[in-house]
Amino acid sequence: MYHVHPGMICPRTKMPGLDREMMVMAYRDRQLTFDDLRGLRAEGYIRDSTLDQKDGFGPAIQRGNEERFAETNGLVLGNRWYTEFSSGRSVEKRLEFHRLLEDAEMDLFDVLLVDHTSRFGRNQAECIRYKEELRLLGKTVVFVSQGIISGSDRDFLAERINETLDEQYSRNLSRYVSAGLYEKAALGHAIGRAPLGYRQEKPPSGRGARIVPDERTMPVLTGLLREYASGRYSFRTLALELNSKGHRTSRGKPFTESSISTVLNNRFYDGKAIYHRGQPDEVIRDGLHHVPGEVKELWQMMPGREGRTIDTRATQPTGKGAAGIYPLTGVLVCDGCGQPFHGITSGSRGKQSPRMAHSWHRCPMRPSSVGVARVEQEFADQVLACVQLDDDWRQTILKALANQGPQPDHSLDVKRIESALANLRKQHLWGAIDDGTFKAEHRVLQRQVKSIQPSSPPLMMPNLDRASRLLQDLPTLWNHPGVTAAQQQGLAREVFQEVRLREGWLVAVRPRPRYAPLFAYALWRQHVAGGARSS
């Protein structure tokens, strides 16, 4: 059986100086200005991609702008700095963005500083959705370079126009890039990073970089192909052998089963240039890059290569027919070392089977891989099957929130500190104290408030309602024949932070904060029902 990560049901905390609900009502009734933000806790969000740096959106520039804004307007800037490097219009893979949403639910800040609307996102529908979610949590989003307070009537038009322009820029760029890559592949040019054994070389003109053999890493590539062709190594043992000799992948990281598989399935070594591999618009051309005869011969000698491509990710369906998509990728981790599991395909020709494996060679936990079908079935039987909410879940959880045991009465102390905070803000606003003194004294008072208040995160009932509806439908959705492996993967990542595996069996799950109280209730209900039956 498995357990749920502790600390999931908790009382609702109050924000220093002003109750959250009163603050939200006040914000609805009047127009926010920058002066209203003085003294509030702020955190910064930074997002960057390679193309953004030349447009003035590098991480250092964003951080500097947000720091200056916080200092100028008297916000107490924290040190979390949600920073990530990602491109694209979707927030699905933006881990830091999801972390800031979770921290907002736990009331770890009041104001989110973002340098520009395009840093928050380039998908207008998603931007509106997540800013509304933050607003319902009592948070204010400020785009510092544009001087926009999100949701403000004064800035509403400017905010929407900027969001539209940001998305249009992304769509145009995506279209131009796709067309350029298609044309590049059609002419026989390799696309993407230089693989193992190769490097990118720029001509004197600085334009039209090409991929050429790398005399430094080419011996590593030929050695890898030669050793695997000998039949003495599996993906795992070959990765360990290469790492023990100090070799690294083309990205400079240790070899894993996945990186070995990538080399053996890369038709670049067969002299091909490919665009959108495995997709309906796939393009395969004879490449213009040079492949040494030994490399090409060794690559073509790989087991199962006769007369077909062994590109398992593109041709071997796994899990509801999805191409190489494993539903628990991203949440399944080893309980021994905490390393994530990734999908591999193992077995001999004609009997290949998808597995989940982790490659940390120092981990004592065995086995290091498990069959995808078995672990997914266990996940459905042991985890999803317990998610049963009856009609009493709301009443029971509310009762638990209201009855956390005897709590000391610190109401007088809270009022005293709130009064001190209000006076401190007035002194700073009138110029009686400088920014440094204000920040130092504000931090001291905040620590005093936190020391006498419960440390558990707040529970937002609107989010809890939405979470309950998804959990109740989760078993049906997961097992529905029309749901793809990619959709299952999205469901797993939405609900769980971790699913832990020990000695080949699931032993624990860690739900995301918004779902944790419901899992706690489901387990409690299961325990009570089991006790009633045994009595």
Image (cartoon, rainbow, N blue to C red):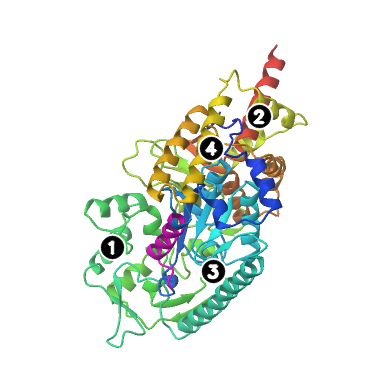
**Residue at point 22% right, 55% down?**
246
Q: Mark 2 to mark 3: distance in Å?
A: 44 Å
Q: What is the three-letter code of the residue carrying label 2?
A: Tyr
Q: Mark 3 to mark 4: distance in Å?
A: 34 Å
Q: Nearer the viewer, mark 1 or mark 4?
A: 4
Q: What is the three-letter code of the residue carrying label 3?
A: Gly
Q: Nearer the viewer, residue 295 or 518?
A: 518
Q: Secondary structure at mark 1?
A: helix
Q: Mark 1 to mark 4: distance in Å?
A: 43 Å
Q: Secondary structure at mark 4?
A: strand
Question: Badge 3, how many Cα within 10 Å: few under 14, some, many 20+?
Answer: some
Label 1 with label 2: CB-CB less than 8 Å: no
Marks 1 and 4, the one that precedes in the sequence: 1
Which residue bears the numbered disc 4? Answer: 510
Q: Nearer the viewer, residue 160 or 207?
A: 160
Q: Nearer the viewer, mark 3 or mark 4?
A: 4
Q: Give the numbered dot on residue 226.
A: 1
Which residue bears the numbered disc 3? Answer: 278
Which residue bears the numbered disc 2? Answer: 521
Q: Is residue 460 left or right of residue 40?
A: right
Residue 26 image point, x, y percent: 67, 47
